[in-house]
Amino acid sequence: MSERNTPLEKRFDKLGPRVAEALERRHFEAYYCPTREEAVRQTLELIPKDSLVAWGGSETLAQLGILDSVKKSNPVIDRDTAVSLEERVELMRKSLLCDVFLMSSNAITEDGQLYNIDGNGNRAAALVYGPKNVIIVAGMNKVTPDIESAVTRARSIAAPINAQRFSVQTGCMATGTCSDCLSPSSICASMVRTRICRPAGRIKVVLVGEELGF
């Protein structure tokens, strides 16, 4: 592994452990992994081999190849195997009762809070209640100074990019920025701030010292 000497890497390596400590104070189980290889290894170690695993849509998980590894080692609920919209929705509903739910977070504050927006609500719902354990994998580019900047990041950066990614007919797809739309297709239908993990340790956060996801 090459040495981490770039200014961005140095910043991440200094800030990452501090954010992990802040998450721990809020009763999350948190890890800082400087590289994606360490993050993948840590994430997989947190998943018991006999656990039923499901996930929410996440570019971060795709970039790290975590889902491919999990499919080889665990029973999974994979909504992308559905042959109809009705089956896909039913698989998403079943995911709320899995053992381990994998996802990323739209933003994580330096004082250890999570902020997420959701269109269908399945990802936010799983985060809040249902799956026995939730594992969040997030690049350090998603860390923001405070909750106000977390909201801004989620709505003005993550949402417009995901609108382009999924071709969602919203104002932000047309303009590239949040217009506080009331579209029935809005991907900001639900907004969830998680300030404390309850029960303690249910949500595990793996911070990666790289830029990943949106």
Image (cartoon, rainbow, N blue to C red):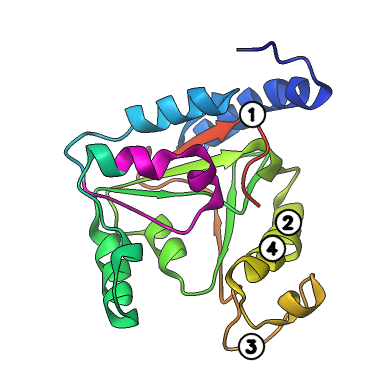
Which percent across, then down, holds residue 49? 21, 34
Mark 3 or mark 1, earlier in chain? 3
Q: Quadrant of residue 79?
A: bottom left
Q: Residue at x 29, y 82 (%)?
A: 86
Q: Please tell me the numbered disc located at residue 153.
A: 2
Q: Which residue is mark 1?
A: 209
Real-space Cα separation, disc 4 to disc 3, in angstroms: 17 Å
Left/right of residue 132 with respect to residue 37 in the rendered view: left
Task: Name the kind of residue labelled 2 in the image.
Answer: Arg
Q: Quadrant of the N terminus?
A: top right
Which percent across, then down, holds residue 159? 66, 66
- Front label number (1 vs 2): 1
Task: Name the kind of residue labelled 3 in the image.
Answer: Ser
Query: Is there a contact, CB below 8 Å, between mark 2 and mark 3?
Result: no
Real-space Cα separation, disc 4 to disc 2, in angstroms: 11 Å
Above/below status of 84 relative to 118: below
Q: Can residue 202 be seen from the camera position used here?
A: no
Task: Name the kind of residue labelled 1 in the image.
Answer: Gly
Judged from the image, the secondary structure of the residue bearing numbered disc 3 is: loop
* Pick the front one: 182 or 169: 169
Q: Residues within 10 Å of mark 3 (few under 14, many from 20)?
A: few
Real-space Cα separation, disc 2 to disc 3, in angstroms: 20 Å
Q: Residue at x 50, y 31 (%)?
A: 24
Q: Please tell me the numbered disc located at residue 183.
A: 3
Task: Name the kind of residue labelled 4 in the image.
Answer: Ile
Q: Which residue is mark 4?
A: 161
Mark 1 or mark 4, earlier in chain? 4
Q: Residue at x 74, y 75 (%)?
A: 172
Left/right of residue 87 with respect to residue 166 in the rendered view: left
